[in-house]
Image (cartoon, rainbow, N blue to C red):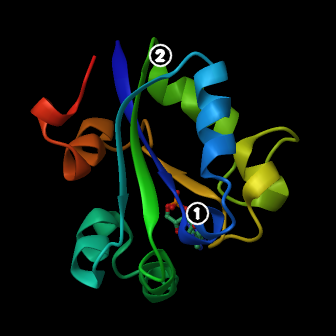
Amino acid sequence: MEKTLLLIKPDVVARNKTGEILARVEKEGFAILGLKHLLLSPQEAELFYGIHRGKEFFEELIAFITSGPVIVCCLGRENAVRYLQEIVGDTNPSEAKPGTLRAIYGTDMHRNGVHIASPDENPSREVHFFFSTRELCS
Ligand code: CMP
């Protein structure tokens, strides 16, 4: 079973939408292998989003993602990385297809509902940024 990471962003957690999102991913056939509720420090956020360091939106991204608690979730399924990308939709909520998580829960480019591991980067690094092997039940 392939593993991937889903992070529910602070504004969505504050709006009490976590349960809806977890229900949706379970309905889509994902198993929840690991789940944490945490507040990222600026240092942790800068490390996690290190690939974006130096981009013009980096500082705002770090300020937003550390503005309140997030939910991080390790999800397992066949073809998990690409399938999650399909149900989450475009990074920009205004470009996301109707019914995708970002179309439903996103507001703008920063408040885009959720972050997911990209197939072009390193999904395993993102999972293990938050979870040790023994924390992941399968
Ligand atoms: P996320 O999947 O969390 O990964 C990095 C985040 O940076 C992205 O979603 C957006 O919320 C945010 N962001 C802001 N501006 C941009 C941009 N121009 N391109 C990509 N991501 C951006």
Q: Quadrant of residue 59?
A: bottom left
Note whether ligand 1 is within 8 Å of mark 1. no
- Residue 81 position, x and y percent, is 46, 29
Tell me what residue is drawn at x 69 percent, y 49 percent.
Answer: 90
Judging depth in this view, the residue of 53 and 11 nearest the camera is 11
Classify mark 2 as within 8 Å of ligand 1 or not, answering yes or no.
no
Check disc 1 and report its element: helix, strand or loop: helix
Choose between 21 and 58: the one closer to the eye: 21
State the quadrant of the C terminus. Answer: top left
Amino acid type indicated by mark 2: Asn
Q: Secondary structure beneath disc 2?
A: loop
Name the spot of residue 87 as percent of width and height, x first. Answer: 68, 33
Vertical placement of residue 46 versus 1, above or below: below
Instruction: Please determine whether, in this image, residue 123 is positioned above or below residue 36.
Output: above
Q: In the image, which disc is placed on residue 45?
A: none
User: Local crowd at mark 1 within 10 Å, few (<14), some, or many (≥20)?
Assistant: some
Which residue matches tag 1?
13
